[in-house]
């Protein structure tokens, strides 16, 4: 884990961030978690994921910041990409939107660098996330920390925290398109989508 003096961590959910928060707390790092996820649908799902993230931050003593929920803006940006598959162009637009907002927040609030756990799930392409982050940070003049939050024992820590805190079990990525895809597949598994292999 990097020894950042002041790191802003963009997170999609508690299961993906748990290992990082645990390690950051143990090392006494200055980390603030940013929750900006206008892609999550519906509002009730957004609220469940936000509340679990707040609970995880409180447990580890990590500062939590929530930016406004803007689903209409997210919908506007992904118009025309409705039929894109997971890891397709819609995901790139979604990542860029959220990471640019994080970079703007970091710049406005004096963070030295930002990172994210958006690529932690096995369903996501980490290089796709990093490419969106590099582009967003370049526009805002902010450093992006490309630490792979799956490595150096963090995957194991993530699973341990998920089990210890009994996080809400997510059955789809978050947006209405991923919800529809999950329903179409008729998924019946109870394991969190962040941990499927």
Image: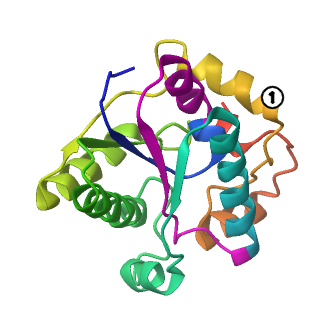
Residue 111 is situated, as x and y percent measured from the top left of the image, at: 27, 47
Q: Is residue 4 above or below residue 76?
A: above
Q: Is residue 97 above or below residue 7?
A: below
From the viewer's side, name the closer residue of 167 and 175.
167
Q: Residue at x 55, y 18 (%)?
A: 26
Q: Quadrant of the C terminus?
A: top right
Q: Quadrant of the N terminus?
A: top left
Q: Residue at x 62, y 55 (%)?
A: 173
Horizontal arrangement in the rendering, residue 157 relative to residue 30 (left or right): right
Locate residue 179: give its quadrant.
Answer: bottom right
Check residue 26 for magenta coloring: yes
- Of all residues shown, which one is farthest toward the top? 152
Query: Dot 1, how many residues are within 10 Å of its Cα: few (below 14), some (14-19), or many (20+)?
Result: few
Residue of label 1: 163
Q: Is residue 152 above or below residue 7?
A: above
From the viewer's side, name the closer residue of 60 and 130.
60
Q: Which residues are magenta?
A: 18-43
Q: Residue at x 66, y 52 (%)?
A: 54
From the viewer's side, name the closer residue of 70 and 39.
70
């Amino acid at each position: 884990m990097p020894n950042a003096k002041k790191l802003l961590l963009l997170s999609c959910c508690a299961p993906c961030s748990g290992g990082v928060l645990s390690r950051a707390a143990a090392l006494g790092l200055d980390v603030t978690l940013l929750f900006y996820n206008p892609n999550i649908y519906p509002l009730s799902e957004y609220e469940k994921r936000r509340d679990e993230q707040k609970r995880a931050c409180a447990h580890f003593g990590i500062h939590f910041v929530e930016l406004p929920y803007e689903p209409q803006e997210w919908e506007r940006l992904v118009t025309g990409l409705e039929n894109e598959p997971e890891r397709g162009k819609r995901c790139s637009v979604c990542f860029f939107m959220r990471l640019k907002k994080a970079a703007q927040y970091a710049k406005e609030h004096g963070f030295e660098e930002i990172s994210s756990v958006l690529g932690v799930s096995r369903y996501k392409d980490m290089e796709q996330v990093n490419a969106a982050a590099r582009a967003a940070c370049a526009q805002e003049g902010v450093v992006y920390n490309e630490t792979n939050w799956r490595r150096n024992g963090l995957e194991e820590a993530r699973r341990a925290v998920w089990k210890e805190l009994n996080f809400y079990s997510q059955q789809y990525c978050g947006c209405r398109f991923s919800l529809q895809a999950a329903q179409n597949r008729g998924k019946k598994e109870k394991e969190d989508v962040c941990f499927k292999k």
